[in-house]
Image (cartoon, rainbow, N blue to C red):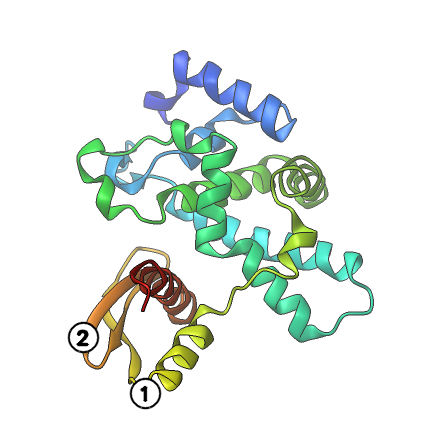
Amino acid sequence: MLSFLEHKSKEDKELLRFLKTILGCKPKNILLYKIALIHKSCSHKDHKGNKINNERLEYLGDTVLSTIVADFLFKKYPHQGEGFLTEMRSKIVSRASLNKLAQKIGLSKLIVYSKGKTSQFISMDGDAFEAIAGALYLDRGYNYSYKVLINNVFSVYIDIDSMENTEWNYKSKIIDWGQKNKKTVSFQVIETIDTPYRKQYKVQVFIEEEPQEIGIDFSIKSAEQLAAEKTYKSLQEQGV
């Protein structure tokens, strides 16, 4: 079917080691996980000319992760309201959080991508983690995926309890900063990036119409948060 992926290699051994030591699972269909690590910059084509990369699995994994984390939080915090649960889920599955998680568990080292364009792949690590989640779901189902991702990944590599007090809404912080300093802060979508399965939005912060930092994500709100966080931290470094 996908002959270029069916031969065994050194990379296969590294992937199997990762799946066993980090996820704690033995895959039934290793091809799914291999596809999950192919960035679109290194797309292959099958015998029908269809592009093979991790975008479809990433699309599926995004929903799988959101559902699993929502399920987990609903059980962990039985008396908290919708607003708290929604914000906690956003913190855990945000692009910045997933990027850091993928790097922490060593997934980033396994991604196949075009080495000459790394600056353009801001969300590559988090995208691959979503794709792995999609592959795990297709390979072993929801219940198995839930146990693996919650018990072996999120509970081990993320301090979920400390996240309750972690500042996340940097958009509000930068707007408050602007009001205190009598400066106009605005957010603009400067580019929409089309992919076969979902759009990415590039948002830039402007202070008094002067361009600041940029954030890229699959929703405008998430991209605004990324841009706001980078801008706020930049202002702090400048002592402004």
> What is the quadrant of residue 74 in the picture?
bottom right
Number of labels in the image equals 2
Residue at left 41%, top 47%? 56
Q: Secondary structure at mark 1?
A: loop
Kind of residue at badge 2 = Glu
Residue at left 58%, top 37%? 136
Query: Which numbered tag is attached to residue 182?
Result: 1
Task: Please name whichever residue, 37 or 50, is drawn nearer the observer in this view of the structure.
Answer: 37
- Across and down, in percent, residue 111 comes to 37, 32
Question: In the rendered view of the protein, which quadrant contains the C terminus?
Answer: bottom left
- Across and down, in percent, residue 21 comes to 61, 22
For this orientation, the residue located farthest to the front is 239
Residue 27 in sight in this render: no
Question: Which residue is identified by label 2?
Answer: 210
- Label 2 crowd bin: few (<14), some (14–19), many (20+), radius 10 Å: few
Question: In the rendered view of the protein, which quadrant contains the N terminus?
Answer: top left
Kind of residue at badge 1 = Lys
Q: Is residue 30 left or right of residue 26?
A: left
Q: CA distance from mark 1 to mark 2?
A: 15 Å
Residue 185 vertical placement versus 7 (above, below) = below
Task: Please name whichever residue, 171 or 75, is drawn nearer the observer in this view of the structure.
Answer: 171
Q: Is residue 134 left or right of residue 99?
A: right
Residue 22 vertical placement versus 133 (above, below) = above
